[in-house]
Image (tube, grey):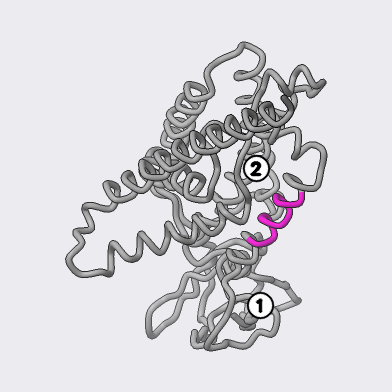
Amino acid sequence: MHIRTISVASPVNNVNAGDSIELLYDVGLDQKMPVHRIEVKNESTEVQFLVRNNQRVNVPQFVAFQSRSQRMPTIVAILLILSIATFLGWIHGMLITKIPLQPFVVTLCGLLFYRGLARYITGDQEQGFGSELPEVKELAKGGFFRILTGDTYSFDIPMPFIYMTLIGVVAAVFLNKTIYGRYILALGRNEQAARFSGISTDKMKIVAYMICSFCGGVAGILFSFDLNSIQPSGHGEFYELYAIAAAVLGGCSLRGGEGSILGVIIAAAVMRVLNNAINLVEGIDTTMEFAIIGMVILMGVIADELVRRYAAKRRALAKIKDTTEGA
């Protein structure tokens, strides 16, 4: 991406950065462009656009205001989305700990309510960014080296991988190196024992739901910029299935108290490889995608149960051995 500046021979008023304007030509097709920066001088206006390296923008004969779809600064909108997501996690945590309700029921009702609300607000219409916010899109899905240097490389690191690595490192440190992370693991393994140990189990549950919702908000922002549009009635369907499968394959026990961040990251990568393999390998019908993923989850649950029984049996034998030797 680079900046292209044009000078219009007349003042262009009431246009701000982020607005879309239409460049009108006597010959050729008109262009709709988002404004990066605009400066009105005495008898002319300088307008800057962020364009692709091979994109041309000619000086127009006329400029017409097209739309103002962005009504707040981008950073404010992103922070607002993350705040709302975290607040929803707090609501779920309160419903589960204070009423209390079953977590599955709260999650399912939230899924239906938020999807229905989104369809109502948008009129059940797809919402997209079009050609707006090119800088933010580049930060969301561009290449790491290209953003640093401005050059294009044959090999680059996608920005979502950078974000995943940063979040994974922070999550691993929090879970394994802080007292609150150990509290969450203890809570998952045995809630009653954790409560008797003096841990505020209700507060830790709420914190866990808030962290989960915050990460969901980050994922939603990255998905929206990656696809450049959102369909409220269909976007994100069955993503919860992928999340469960990645957690189980990554070594997280469905009973709680076990698992690692690295294992979940590796399992998520395996899930994407599995998804691509289903679509690329000849002889596998793509309509079998969910069936294969379902079988993977089932095998993971079965393996989790067998490992749990084996570990319990070994502990029992070790206890009997210690008792015999002591006698």
- Mark 2 crowdedness (10 Å alpha carbons): few <14, some 14-19, many ≥20: many
Kindly identify the residue that appears in the image at 71 percent across and 21 percent down: 193
Along the line of sight, the residue nearer the viewer: 299 or 205: 299
Main SS of residues in magenta: helix
Q: Is residue 74 visible?
A: no
| Segment tinted magenta in the rendering | 165-173
Task: Inspect the image, locate mark 1, and give the three-letter code of the amino acid beneath it.
Answer: Ile
Residue 208: image quadrant is top right
Label pair 1/2, CB-CB below 8 angstroms: no
Q: Is residue 41 visible?
A: yes
Disc 1 crowd, CA 10 A, few/some/many (<14, 14-19, 20+) = some
Label 2 residue SS: helix
Q: Label for residue 214?
A: 2
Q: Earlier in the sequence, mark 1 or mark 2?
A: 1
Q: Is residue 310 above or below residue 158?
A: above
| Secondary element type, mark 1 | helix
Residue 200 is situated, as x and y percent measured from the top left of the image, at 78, 22
Q: Which residue is mark 1?
A: 147
- 1 or 2: mark nearer the eye: 2
